[in-house]
Amino acid sequence: MIKSKSKTNSTTSKVIPKPIDDKESKCFNCGKRSHLSRECRFKDLGKKCFSCNSFGHIANQCPTRSNVNTLKGLMFKAIKINEHELQALIDTGSQLNLIRIDQYLLP
C-alpha cells in the first residue's frame, strides 16, 4: 500500500495538502535545507552545480567534470595509444588492463 502525503476529504473530494516539514524541505537552487527555492538568496546566480559547488550551471553541464562517458552503466574514457584514439572501458575493480592485439597494432 502506498501512503500519500496528502489527505482526501471524502465528503467534498478536495485534496488537503500536507504542511511543509522543515526537515523535509530543501532549496533546489543551493541545496540547503534551511529554506525553499523561492526564498533563496542565491536565486539570481542561477542553479547550483552539485559537482563543483559553483552557480550558473547544473552538474550534467559542469565544465570541470571529467571526460568519462557512460553507456548502460559502463564507463568509457577516450585514450590515445600509438597516436590512435580509442574508447577504453573503465573497470575500477580490475587489477590488470587488457587490450586487443589488433587495437594495439593499428598502423
Image: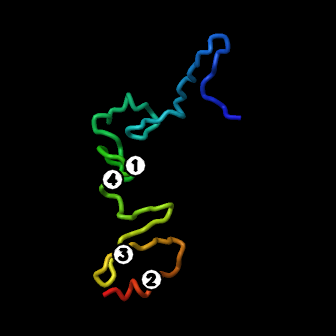
Give the colouring mode of the picture.
rainbow
Question: In the image, which is nearer the foreground, mark 4 or mark 2?
Answer: 2
Q: Nearer the viewer, residue 51 or 107?
A: 107
Q: Residues within 10 Å of mark 1 (few under 14, many from 20)?
A: some
**Looking at the rendering, which quadrant does residue 77 occupy?**
bottom left
Q: Residues within 10 Å of mark 3 (few under 14, many from 20)?
A: few
Which residue matches tag 3?
86
Q: Amino acid at mark 4?
A: Cys
Vertically, is 83 above or below 33?
below
Residue 99 is labelled as 2
Q: Amino acid at mark 2?
A: Ile
Question: Are the residues at dot 4 and dot 2 in contact (C-beta closer than 8 Å)?
Answer: no
Q: Secondary structure at mark 1?
A: loop
Which residue matches tag 1?
50
Q: Position of residue 73 (x, y in %)?
A: 50, 61
Residue 80 is labelled as none
Residue located at (45% from left, 66% from top): 75
Q: Secondary structure at mark 2?
A: loop
Vertically, is 41 above or below 15?
below
Residue located at (50% from left, 33% from top): 25
Q: Position of residue 68 (x, y in %)?
A: 39, 64
Q: Amino acid at mark 1?
A: Phe
Residue 62 is labelled as 4
Q: Earlier in the sequence, mark 1 or mark 2?
A: 1
Question: In the image, which is nearer the foreground, mark 4 or mark 1?
Answer: 4
Q: Amino acid at mark 3?
A: Leu
Gap between marks 3 and 2 measured at Cα: 10 Å
Q: Residues within 10 Å of mark 4 (few under 14, many from 20)?
A: some
Q: Earlier in the sequence, mark 3 or mark 2?
A: 3
Gap between marks 1 and 2 measured at Cα: 35 Å
**Looking at the rendering, which quadrant does residue 45 occupy?**
top left
Lateral position of residue 44 relative to residue 25, left or right = left
